[in-house]
Image (cartoon, rainbow, N blue to C red):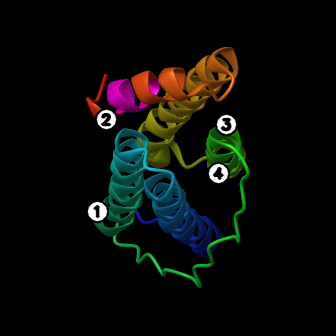
Amino acid sequence: MKMNDELEFEFGRQVTREFSSALLYRQLAVDLDLRDLPGMASWMRTHADEEVAHADRLIAHLNSRGNRAVIGEITVPSVKADTVTEIFEIALDGEREISAAIRELYRLSQEQGDIDSRPVIDWFVAEQIEEEATVSGIIGQLKMVNEDGAGLLRMDATLGSGA
């Protein structure tokens, strides 16, 4: 069943947000590469790829229902971080913004009685809980090592291994 124009538009806005999030993660990867932390940079690039996959998932949902995703203007916020912890805090802020937008999409689809969107939105709600918890955990560990070189290198190796 085709969704109405308002819901289609909001799904399109979420597609744009996911692509924007991917670019944010890419920018953070650049900053980590410049700090000689290739494992953390790789982790950020992997997450950038996941954000593109999220956009693709939303596009597939729209297409399967006979709707059309319109990708809006994508802007990458200017980011500046003095510490590795701040880099990951920027990532967490981005995830929280995505989570809030997903919850609004959920509310709108519920308000409109669009039960066909429920499975994809439920998946995103669960995914965002996981994403926020993962980045929060990394921040907690970064605070424990307190920007100590040996601790950062251990975390860099761990995040670079995909663990």
Q: Quadrant of the N terminus?
A: bottom left
Report the side of 44 relative to 7 (left or right): left
Question: Between marks 2 and 3, how big is the CA–CA gap?
Answer: 16 Å
Question: Between marks 4 and 2, how big is the CA–CA gap?
Answer: 33 Å
| Secondary structure mostly seen in the magenta stretch | helix
Amino acid type shown at disc 4: Leu
Looking at the picture, does residue 130 appear above or below residue 31? above
User: Closer to the camera, 26 or 113?
Assistant: 26
Q: Please state the extent of the stretch shown in magenta in the rendering.
A: 155-159
Report the side of 124 relative to 7 (left or right): left
Q: Which mark is residue 64?
A: 1
First in residue order: circle 1 vs circle 4:
1
Do the numbered discs 1 and 2 sit on residues whose CB atoms are within 8 Å?
no
Q: Quadrant of the C terminus?
A: top left
Question: What x and y, as percent, mark residue 157?
Answer: 34, 28
Q: Secondary structure at mark 4?
A: helix
In the rendered structure, does residue 42 fall within the stretch colored magenta? no
Q: Which residue is mark 4?
A: 105
First in residue order: circle 2 vs circle 3:
3
Q: Which residue is mark 3?
A: 85
Which one is in front in this view, the residue at disc 1 or the one at disc 2?
2
* Residue drawn at point x = 28 percent, y = 29 percent: 162
Question: Between marks 1 and 2, how big is the CA–CA gap?
Answer: 36 Å
